[in-house]
Amino acid sequence: MPVGTIFSRDLLEKTLSAAPVTIGTNEDFSSGVGNYLGGTLGFDEILRTFEKISTHCERSDIDPVIKELRQQEEETARVCDKFLRRYDPPG
């Protein structure tokens, strides 16, 4: 899946030939360029975004991203539980 323009890094001239679809970190601060497919704030939002990417980019393989996302969800829950056991023990 090719990358068109990275607005935070590319030259102004590259914005004139931006990709037809866009993802971002937060929809509230979207660039307004291309069809916005979603953001990257939170596990659920990342999942929805990559599902949309797979429908727009037929040759994209999102399975590795989904696998990593699931592993990170589990790890985050494990670390949060560990923190709560240590700093908020049952009374």
Image (cartoon, grey):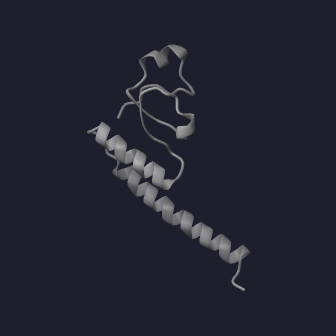
**Residue 20, x across and y down, in percent:** 37, 27
**Relative horizontal placement of residue 91, taking residue 69 as reference (left or right):** right
**Residue 48, x across and y down, in percent:** 41, 49
Is residue 58 placed above or below 90 in the rendered structure?
above
Q: Please name the residue shown 29% across and 42% down the image.
A: 55
Is residue 27 placed above or below 85 in the rendered structure?
above
**Residue 29, x across and y down, in percent:** 57, 35
* Placement of the C terminus among the 4 image quadrants: bottom right
Q: Please name the residue shown 53% across and 26% down the image.
A: 7
Is residue 30 placed above or below 89 in the rendered structure?
above
**Relative horizontal placement of residue 78, taking residue 46 as reference (left or right):** right
Q: Nearer the viewer, residue 73 or 37?
A: 37
Tally of marks: 0
Q: Residue furthest top?
A: 13
Q: Residue furthest left?
A: 58
Q: Residue furthest bottom?
A: 91
**Residue 43, x across and y down, in percent:** 49, 55
Q: Which quadrant of the figure has residue 53?
A: top left
Q: Please name the residue shown 31% across and 45% down the image.
A: 61
**Relative horizontal placement of residue 90, taking residue 20 as reference (left or right):** right
* Placement of the N terminus among the 4 image quadrants: top left
**Relative horizontal placement of residue 26, taking residue 65 as reference (left or right):** right
